Image: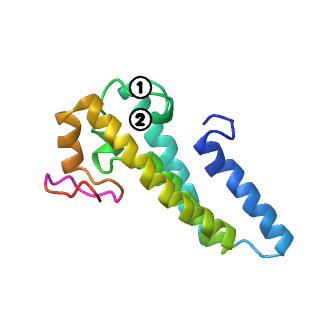
Amino acid sequence: MRKSLSSTSTRTFLLWPLVVGVEQAVSRRRVGVAGLPLMAAGYAAYRLAGAYRLPRAGGPPGMSQGMPERLVEDGPYRWTRNPMYAGHLLFLSGLALSTRSPLATGLLGWHVRWFADRVRRDEQRLHERFGAAYDEYRARTPRWIPGPRTGSRSAEQ
C-alpha cells in the first residue's frame, strides 16, 4: 500500500477510518463490532489478491500506474475479476456497519459508484491490451460477486 493520499488504498484503509473515527468521537457515538469481520475480510482480500497478482501479471502494482504484462485468470481472479476492488468495498461496508455513520455510509455509496466507473475503464484498457483472451475471461468470470466460472456469466455482474 502506497502511503500517499493519492493512493486509493491509503484513503480506504487509513484515511477514511481515521476521519470516520474522529466523526464518531465528536458526535459521541459508539463504534460497534458487527462490521469488524467485514473490515478484516476486505483488507485481507485486497492484500492477498494484490500479493497474488503482482508477481504473475508483471507491470506496476495497480492499473492506475500502468498495464499488467500478463492476464491473471487463476487464484482469487478465478472467482471474481476484481477481488482487490471488492476488498475495498467490503472494508468500507464493514466501516459503515460498525459505525452506523452517515459519513461512512456516504463514503461507501460514493466508492461503489467510483469503483464501478473505474472497472469499466479498466475493462476497456484490458480488452485493448489482451483482446480475445480478456473477452473470454470476462465472459466466464463475474465482475464483482465471487462464484464459480460457468462460461455463461454476464460480463456485467
Query: In the image, what residue occupies the spot 28% across and 54% down?
Result: 142
The 10 Å Cα crowd at callout 1, few under 14, some 14 to 19, many 20 or more, is: few
**Residue 141 vs residue 18: left or right?**
left
| SS of the residue under disc 1 | helix
Which of the 4 image quadrants contains residue 131?
Answer: top left
Q: Quarter holding the C terminus?
A: bottom left
Can residue 60 be seen from the camera position used here? Answer: yes
Identify which residue, 47 or 101, lies in the foreground. Answer: 101
The 10 Å Cα crowd at callout 2, few under 14, some 14 to 19, many 20 or more, is: some
Residue 52, numbered circle:
2
Q: Position of residue 36 (x, y in %)?
A: 61, 64
Q: Position of residue 57 (x, y in %)?
A: 36, 28
Query: CB atoms at circles 2 and 1 under 8 Å apart?
Result: yes
Which secondary structure type mostly characterizes the magenta part of the structure?
Answer: loop
Which of the 4 image quadrants contains residue 111?
Answer: bottom right
| In the image, residue 33 lies in the stretch drawn in magenta | no
**Residue 18 vs residue 142: left or right?**
right
Query: In the image, what residue occupies the spot 49% across and 35% down?
Result: 64
Q: Position of residue 13 (x, y in %)?
A: 63, 50
Residue 71 higher or lower than 69, as above or below: below
Name the amino acid type tagged 1: Pro
Residue 55, numbered circle:
1
Query: In the image, what residue occupies the spot 61% across and 69% down?
Result: 105
Q: Position of residue 97 (x, y in %)?
A: 60, 72
Span highlighted in magenta in the image: 145-151
Identify which residue, 10 or 124, lies in the foreground. Answer: 124
Name the amino acid type tagged 2: Tyr
Can residue 37 be seen from the camera position used here? Answer: no
| In the image, residue 148 lies in the stretch drawn in magenta | yes
**Residue 134 vs residue 66: left or right?**
left
Residue 24, numbered circle:
none
